[in-house]
């Protein structure tokens, strides 16, 4: 496996072509950002922990019938993946009200949401990822109604699987965001990553945060301890590589 051309360099990951036109290499960097990249730090091994956590979660989802772009993890911070044409929609699933939801709407922080809220945002830093509805998605031409329905269905199935997966290791899955893309045959697959960067994870007993929210709140010294705690809980000893 060899990196060839850089396709995209985002806030925390770089994507490269490979010798196989249908595959890409995703390199997880040690960058940590907040506020649409306005604040940035580098945290040792952060990329590796996110890559390994994402790979584990993708494997769990595959075992439960959810197709992902994941192929292999040849290095601790490098993922080999199927090449996807990404749909510019962030699908956010909320199980507990917190964050922007309670800032924008009259709902108490910590309220359990049953059924979960499925929110879709336009993935575009220039416009600060505004919330979408079906009509706006149609006007922008970024997905059909059938595709929106598929994204919703897949996101809720992911939620069912991961809520139990995290509960079994003493973690509450508060909310998370996922992205999807189309493979060469037009199939919609889960892509990008699922890690503490894009999830709110709370300890089931203490409700301590185990995710990127620590960085947003300026608790930089606690961030890597939280990521490592998630890693230690979900990765069996015989699978640990760090």
Image (cartoon, rainbow, N blue to C red):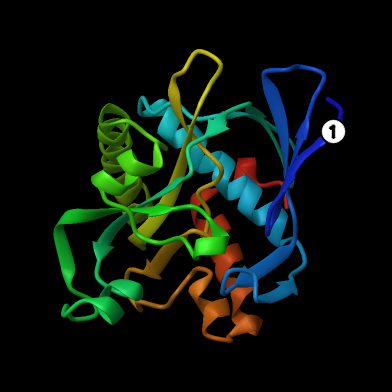
Rendered residue at 43%/52% (across/down) = 122
Q: Which element type, helix, strand or loop, lies under badge 1?
A: loop
Q: Residue at x 68, y 57 (%)?
A: 12
The image quadrant that residue 155 belongs to is top left
Q: Is residue 221 above or below residue 65?
A: below
Outermost bottom residue: 218
From this view, report whether residue 242 is shown above or below residue 190.
below
Relative to 138, residue 237 above or below: below
**Does 15 sit left or right of 101 as displayed?**
right
**Spot occupied by residue 1 in the image (x, y as percentages of width and height):** 83, 25
The count of marks equals 1
Left or right, 90 with reference to 136:
right
Using the image as rendered, state which of residue 4 and residue 128 is in the foreground: 128
What is the x, y in percent for residue 225? Answer: 61, 73
User: For the view shown, which residue lies furthest in the top direction?
Assistant: 185
Residue placed under numbered mark 1 in the picture = 5
Where residue 152 appears, as percent x and y from the top left, is: 27, 40
Q: Residue furthest left?
A: 114
Rendered location of residue 214, percent (x, y): 53, 78
Q: Residue at x 77, y 67 (%)?
A: 44
Using a 10 Å C-alpha cutoff, classify the residue at mark 1 as few (fewer than 14 neighbours), some (14 to 19) or many (20 or more).
Answer: few
Above-or-below relation of 168 to 142: below
Q: Report the front residue among 126 and 107.
A: 126
Which residue is painted at 17% across and 78% down in the image?
107
């Amino acid at each position: 496996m060899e990196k060839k051309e850089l396709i995209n360099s985002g806030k925390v990951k770089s994507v490269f072509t490979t010798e196989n036109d249908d595959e890409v290499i995703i390199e997880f960097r040690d960058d940590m950002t907040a506020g649409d990249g306005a604040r940035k730090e580098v945290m040792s091994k952060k990329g590796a922990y996110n890559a390994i956590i994402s790979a584990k979660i993708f494997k769990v989802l595959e075992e439960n019938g959810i197709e992902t772009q994941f192929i292999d993890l040849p290095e601790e911070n490098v993922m080999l993946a199927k090449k996807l044409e990404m749909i510019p929609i962030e699908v956010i699933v909320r199980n507990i009200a917190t964050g922007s939801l309670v800032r924008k709407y009259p709902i108490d922080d910590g309220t359990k949401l049953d059924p979960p809220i499925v929110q879709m945002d336009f993935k575009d830093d220039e416009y600060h990822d505004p919330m979408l509805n079906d009509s706006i998605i149609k006007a922008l031409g970024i997905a059909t109604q059938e595709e929106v329905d598929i994204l919703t269905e897949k996101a809720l199935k992911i939620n069912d699987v991961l809520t139990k997966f995290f509960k079994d290791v003493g973690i509450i899955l508060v909310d998370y965001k996922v992205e999807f893309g189309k493979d060469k045959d037009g199939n919609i697959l889960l892509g990008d990553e699922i890690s503490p960067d894009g999830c709110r994870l709370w300890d089931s007993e203490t409700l301590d945060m185990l995710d990127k929210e620590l960085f947003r709140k300026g608790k930089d010294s606690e961030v890597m301890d939280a990521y490592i705690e998630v890693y230690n809980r979900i990765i069996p000893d015989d699978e640990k590589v760090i």
